[in-house]
Amino acid sequence: MVKVQISQGPHAGTLQKIAKPFGDSGQTVLAVKPSEYLKYFQWDGTKYPMEKSLKVLGAKIASIHKTCEEKLKKLVDEQNDIKNKLQILVKKESKSYLVKDLGEIIYEARIPKQHFVNTFGSAQMTTVLVVLNSKQVKKFEDCYLSVLTEYKQADFENWQKRTRSNVEFQNQNIEDEEIRKETVESEYKALLARHKQTMQFPGAVPESAKSLNLKDDDGNELWRMTAMKDEVALYCRLLGKQGFRTQEFSYNVEEYTNNKNLEAQLNQELRNVKEKISDRSGQNFMDLFTALSHLKIMRTFIDGVLRFGIPPTFVMGIIKPTIQRNDEKVKANLTKAFAEEHLMEMYGQKEEAQDEDFFPYCMSTLTCPVGKLN
């Protein structure tokens, strides 16, 4: 006797995983609902020949489980790989300039390339895009040429300590102390002289800050300016501390177009692999559910042989209680139907802990973790 019940089974994890693409009611087994498949269950002698040993049949069921897992995992890995590639390409979608990729705005608005210094082949300078609210424009114009020089002046003493320590560390393997000291002093003085020169540089080209006449719904404007390439990381960080959003930008419309084409291609590949996962999930569900059903029938058959002996002279069937709390009523009615009258008292659930429940039939629970078997 096989009882149908909703709980966890040996293939529960795999069944739950492959059933996700279908929602609550999409699972089918051989084009019918699981409940209908069980109701009219027929042993598949082609896939599970009855002349084969239980060991062989069990190994085949385990092999089906493994194959289903591997095929689904391969497709899921492919899907994750495409998603990772898309994550690198796709920028944050937003109307706000405080969130959206600033380069996207440039290309979407078709700003002429003459606004950007890299298009003139400059190796020392780069373009920085800045988002300014109307209330921040004056503050920005007052500080963008001085923020870097003021920082270097305030940091000069710490710079000397850091630089000397770095030079000493780089030359620590020189064994001769006099030579090491001379080398450290020579390298440090050269770095100091160069740093004093750069302390006078503003980090940005004077009068290069210009509005691009682009504004979002919140009144944030997009500006561009030209900065020195070797100082741009520090410069942008200092502007960020002043409350300005910045982004280094190199104009390359060809690269932008290629990325957009690649994004469209990856989105199509993602849709294709999702369809494959849906198809594979349906096939896996059918294979695993039928395998699980045959496994349970095998288990019940073995219990019957162990209980009633051979040759087998018993029948097997499937029962599904209409509601969960009817389990005990079903068991009681089965006991009345199959128990010998003079042995009736020995059957049923035992109240004493050391006594084992005993029934005139064998029962195995058939589990389905993906939904109710209506």
Image (cartoon, rainbow, N blue to C red):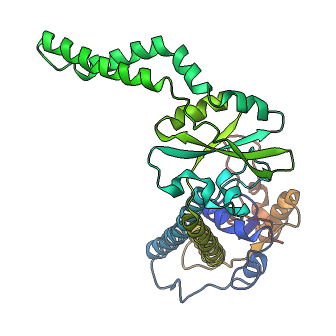
- Identify the residue at image location x=53%, y=67%: 78
Q: Is residue 79 visible?
A: no
Q: Quadrant of the N terminus?
A: bottom right
Quadrant showing the C terminus: bottom right
Q: Nearer the viewer, residue 25 or 231?
A: 231
Residue 44 in the figure: left or right of residue 171: right
| Residue most extreme to the bottom | 46
Relative to 42, say whether 214 is above or below.
above
Q: Is residue 91 visible?
A: yes
Q: How many numbered tags mark residues here?
A: 0
Q: Is residue 175 left or right of residue 282?
A: left
Asked where in the image residue 254 lies, by quadrant, the reply is bottom right
In the drawing, does residue 357 fall left or right of residue 235?
right
Residue 23 x/y as whole percent: 77, 68
With respect to residue 123, does 140 lie above or below?
A: above
Of all residues, the one furthest to the left in this rendering is 176
Residue 34 coordinates in the image, percent (x, y): 74, 76
Residue situated in front as seen by the camera: 25 or 367: 25
| Residue 263 image position (x, y, % from top left) | 61, 68
**Residue at x 55%, y 23% (from the top left corner):** 149
Residue 62 falls left or right of residue 27 = left
Residue at the spot 50% in from the left edge and 24% down from the top edge: 200
Closest to the observer, 134 or 30 = 134
Picture coordinates of residue 123 (x, y %)? 44, 48
